[in-house]
Amino acid sequence: MNKLWHVAFQEYKRHVFLKRFIFSLLSLPLVIGMMLLLIFVMELSENDPRPLGYVDHSGVLAQAIPVPATSRFDHLVDLVPYDDEAPARAALDSGEIQAYYLLPPDYLETNHVTLVYVRDIGSNARRQFVDFLQLNLLAGRPDNIVDLAMEGPEVIVRTPDGSREFSRSRMLSLLLPVFASMALVILILTSSGYLIGAVAEEKESRTMEILITSISPNQLISGKLLGITAVVITQALSWLFFGALFIFIGGSYFGYEWLQDARMDFSTVVVIIAVMLPTYVLFAALLTAAGAAVSAVQEGQQIAGFFSMLLWIPFMLLQHVMESPNSPLVVGLSLLPVTSPMIITMRNFLTIVPTWQVVTSVLLSSVAAAGAVWLAGRSLRAGMLRYGQRLKLGELFKRS
Amino acid sequence: MMNTVEVSHITKTFGDTRAVDDLTFAVERGEIFGLLGPNGAGKTTAIRILLDIFKPDGGSVAILGGPMTEAKKNHIGYMPEERGLYQDSVLEGCLVYLGTLKGLSAAEARKRVAVQLERFELAEHKSKKVKELSKGMQQKAQLIATLVHQPELLIIDEPFTALDPINTQMIKDLMHDLRRDGVTILMSTHQMHQVEELCDRILLIDHGRKLLYGSLDDIRKQYSGHAVLVRPEGELPTLEGIEAITQVNSTVKMSLAAGISPQEILKALLAKKVILEKFEIAVPTLDEIFIRAVAEAAS
């Protein structure tokens, strides 16, 4: 096995088999789990399991068709018919039912319904009765008409050339690339500690001289970058897995419509990977170079803070990007290696990003990433034997 | 026979300081070579240039038959003055990792590390973290890391620093064993008595410049004064051709006049029926040579 892979594997093991990493890995699913639990508890608290009564003088509900449950978490309540308002009122007063609806004889003309309650009814019961009424009003119509009327119209907004479209059900699919760019920022920020400290351990433990007489500085730095990238990918994949699990559970079990039918086009995935990978390598190499040049990890963290500020520029310009996604400034930022992934994914949500801009951005980012890896190698070579002494910028370009 | 290391006119400057100044020397195959000098003489810089850690400002280095390459790094063992192992790593894992960086497969490295751990009596500590080991144990572990890939050339910077007598002896024995196995050893030190015991040839440098270079015997001869050391039984008679007599502990150092040989003095002593417990040509210690050479260079 090439020495570079040994370094990469060692670096990977060094981080992944730590409790700290396991905690950070589980932090996202824990947060998602807590969110799901919170939503579930909030829904439960809003729901009232007691039956709901109704008094129908209009005859619309004479041969009532019940609302079928669409998910196991619909919390359907029993709908109890009353011939007259008096027994319904008695049941309400005794607490047998949470409320009752009153449909007057002229309901079909006036569309007026009265809800009588002591305390406001649960949202589940309100939603259920509206669906129940709608379903029975549509009784006798063909099933497809019933389904269309019940679900409402699906408006699809399409660009004139037909290359992009937007609809309520595809909202998540369109937002996923934006989430991916935010995930990149979070991954860079979380891995910055690893990157800054990539060679700090060797410097602190004085193993640098032994390593450097076994492997070239470029191989060492590349191996370390590879190992840390693998750590980040492990983290990203685990987050992706838990995210997909969240979408699946939310869409299939909880029946949240906005979580259903979430998908990304293959071309979008390719664009995201193409613009994000070189940018990640660029940041990773710059952070590693900074870590190799400084005398203490703490000093490196200040530099990491500066780099993270660069990452947030696109988010600070969010309003401008949304208002003018094709302005010269935004197009310029799309090409700039540091900001391109975030800007391109945001613009992808709002407009059509020309292919030449994506290709130019990827090329520029790749060149910058290669340069940063070279710089990291130089920084390691020049700074590897400096214990407690900071490297000056000019020294990076001197013969060591 | 090709030399293992050939250094030709190397110089290296850091800022205003010339750390190595036109240094030329060779290390022959299979010998123990001592690179000597006072603190700050440029020994470590010279070693780092040999190992391609630093690029020289001028001059050239040939190591194992040519310029340093990545492949050659697998044939060199280096123990720097600043000893270091991954403190938070488990001993065995740390050594196996360092072995793989010297070109061994993980399986081979594990096998060899196991053998060396037994040899250095560290096998029972293999699952401990490095930081949990004593200094002596860490020193042994450092040696394993340096030797695990069976190098052709071993470079040790200050091998005896902060070692107790047991570990000092262990390293000396090891160096003898390695020389017997044909390993070339370059050691840098300022502990002269260790050099006298171990080295075949030496290079003495100061302020980055060469002061003395050659075999120990030749250098001693070069610095030997025109004197003999004598320990007689009883009183020493007056002899012709003696310029000065100095008492050194129980021995008398007799400085000879020009044109008088030690053999003539021995003959004269025996003629006067002096019983001799000791008679030898006075040879300066390496410590004395070191001090004289450095002082001469300074003046």
Image (spheres, rainbow, N blue to C red):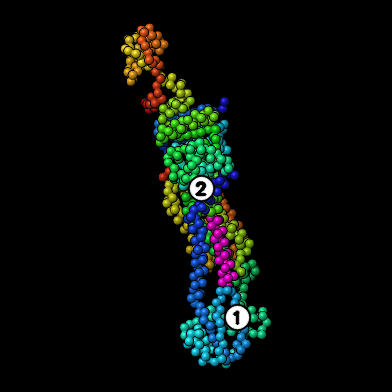
Q: Amino acid at mark 1?
A: Val
State the SS at label 2.
helix
Q: Residues within 10 Å of mark 2 (few under 14, many from 20)?
A: many
Chain hosting mark 1: A
Q: Residue at x 46, y 32 (%)?
A: B171
Q: Residue at x 38, y 16 (%)?
A: B278
Q: Nearer the viewer, residue A165 or B70?
A: B70
What x and y, as percent, mark residue B25? 49, 28
Is any part of residue A317 visible from this angle? no
Q: How many marks?
A: 2
State the SS at label 1.
loop
Relative to B241, residue B69 above or below: below
- Give the mark, 1 or 2, whose residue is nearer the N terminus: 1
Q: Which residue is mark 1?
A: A67
Relative to A58, residue A159 above or below: above
Residue stretch in magenta:
A232-255
Q: Nearer the viewer, residue A23 or A299?
A: A23
Work out which quarter of the rendered image holds the N terminus of chain B and state it.
top right
Q: Amino acid at mark 2?
A: Ala
Q: Residue at x 56, y 76 (%)?
A: A74
